[in-house]
Image (cartoon, helix red, strand yellow):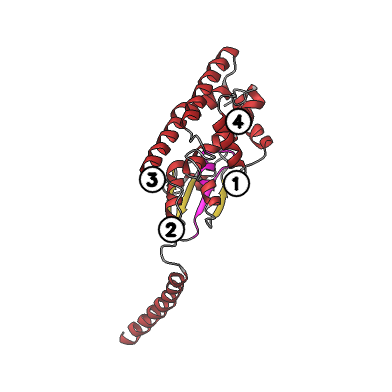
Amino acid sequence: FCSRLFRVSLRVAKWFASHSSLLWLKLRNRKKGEMEKPRFFVSKACPFAQRAWIVVEEKKIPHEFVEIDLQNKPEWFLNLPGSTGKVPAIELDGKLYVESLEVAELLDGLHGDSKLMPADPFQKYQYNRLISTLGQSYIAPFFQHLKAQTEESQASTKAALVKALLTLEEMFDSEGPYALGKEFTLADSNMYPFFYRLPVLRHYRNFTLPDEVPKIKRWMKAMEAREGVKATCMPEEFYIEKYKRLADGNM
């Protein structure tokens, strides 16, 4: 019995020693505060996903890019612990994090010494106002205008969209070129995806930005020039095709 117990103990000790070495090497090669390369779940057509995607590209965050077909979501994605079935989602050290604003802020906080979230309390206040106004007054009219099928409903949704644009114009920094001033921040990355899709409205609803929003137009040009932003943008034709069913009233 003692001999058999000794052999079993020896095998356990050898197993532990080999696995301990692997764990030690893994920990040794990981820098302080560094997480394993995350899996980043995204849809190229989704403006909410692009919010976090811009942060990933701007900060050059190592990641595994996993594209999700939102019209045919895979079961394995839906079954991930914590999954809401939405994108963006990011898996960090075995845990899933969801919701676009929260994921963008999480990625910004975890990576790099320079943060995209404004540190100045007054700028952070303005950031919160911009994102709140975008969510409450701009995003819904944007998609409602795209879905509107009658002239009456299109006139109504267009008026609401223009009103939201004029409100945002007043809130943008006077000197720019970015929403809060000279520096690129999360305000820019969280708003831009919903402006980059304006060509969809131009195509289906003949909608263009009004002349009364010069700060927004200047901001869009500044955003278009950023390499991190460009890396997340598809050609106009891509979005026009992806949003066709919505524009035709089939969704």
Q: Nearer the viewer, mark 4 or mark 2?
A: 4
Alpha carbon of mark 1 to alpha carbon of mark 3: how far? 23 Å
Residue labelled with disc 2: 93
- The verdict on residue 51 being magenta is yes
Alpha carbon of mark 2 to alpha carbon of mark 1: how far? 30 Å
Q: Earlier in the sequence, mark 1 or mark 3?
A: 3
Residue labelled with disc 3: 120
Residue labelled with disc 1: 226
Q: Which residues are magenta?
A: 37-53
Alpha carbon of mark 3 to alpha carbon of mark 4: how far? 31 Å
Q: Nearer the viewer, mark 1 or mark 3?
A: 3
Q: Does dot 3 land on a helix, a strand or a loop?
A: loop
Q: Is residue 87 visible?
A: no
Q: Nearer the viewer, residue 57 or 179?
A: 179
On residue 198, which mark appears?
4
Amino acid type of the residue that numbered disc 1 sits on in the rendered structure: Arg
Label 3 crowd bin: few (<14), some (14–19), many (20+), radius 10 Å: few
